Amino acid sequence: MQEQPLSLNGQNNHVITGTIFCPKTPRSALVIAHGMAEHAGRYADFARWLAKQDIAVVTLNHRGHGPECPPHQLGHYSDTDGWEKVVDDLHQVLLDARERFPGIPLALLGHSMGSFIAQSCAQQHPNSLDCLILSASNRISRPHLWVSGILIRGIRRLYGQHHRSPTIAGMTFGKFNRLFRPNRTDCDWLSRDTAQVDQYVADPLCGFECTAGLWHDFIQGMLTIKPSLWRQTLPVHLFSGSDDPVGEMGKGITRHAQHIQRAGVRETSLRLFEGGRHEMLNEANAEEVREHVFSLLVTENEFDN
């Protein structure tokens, strides 16, 4: 297995960075889109494990994330067209993966924020992938997003795009963590594995507050997601912890899976891991979760076009 850095040219002179994990004879390939306030490096162990199973993996850092991001830009997509740019970055990585690994199925796994970027990419570029896997996602609740969007838009106008708002932090990550009181850390909602939580807390490239501009772009981007516009033959597989607050403790992500099915997507599945929190790949039962994702990548009929 070989590892090499990913470096691609994105819009506005942005350099897309990440890592390519390539086994000698890959039987399928996977692109991983990480979540908010983390980075691609956190998926390296999972990628190496998959590479040992002959799955090629490509990870990327979204704009405003990762070690190459200037400190003042951490947690901020762009001053203009932020959502369009992060979706286009992901599309560029998918195109590059197709060229690097021709003739084998290409899947896309998006976690949390990355799951919504992945859905937008699948919607806008339906033939760029063969399978969509969504980790720790949620339903698109338009009334809730509209209300949140109004508040965030006001904060952005009042304080500027780069403002990091305690109000926004309190109504998102802070709200999620309060569900697990008494709290040991500010990030208990991520996993029952305390060692994984502590690693996240100690990582300077994790857990930072994102800007009002990013939150505005994120919500507006989510509102564009419509499974009825997806390729109906695209296999879509969702997985989450039953105690993930982002997925409304299993209820929201279940409704999302049902919505995708009703929209006409012919092959949709949902796996809820009992007791799991937000980061199932870093949970107490991470090995079971890895095996589940692997099973999705090697089942041949998952990639029928």
Image: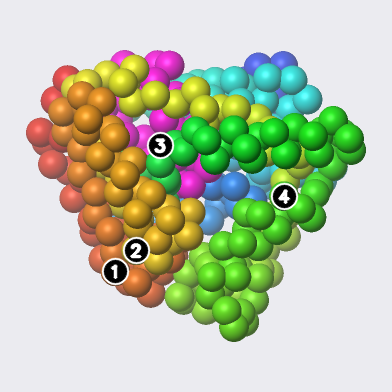
Callout 3 amino acid: Val
Lower sequence index among marks 1 and 4: 4
Q: Residue at x 59, y 68 (%)?
A: 177
Q: CA distance from mark 1 to mark 3?
A: 26 Å
Asked where in the image residue 106 lies, by quadrant, the reply is top left
Identify the residue under disc 1: 274
Lower sequence index among marks 2 and 4: 4
Identify the residue under disc 4: 168
For the magenta stretch, what is the residue range? 104-132
Q: CA distance from mark 2 to mark 4?
A: 25 Å
Q: CA distance from mark 1 to mark 4?
A: 29 Å
Q: Residue at x 61, y 62 (%)?
A: 175
Q: Residue at x 56, y 27 (%)?
A: 221
Callout 1 amino acid: Glu
Identify the residue under disc 3: 31
Was residue 263 drawn as part of the magenta stretch in this picture? no
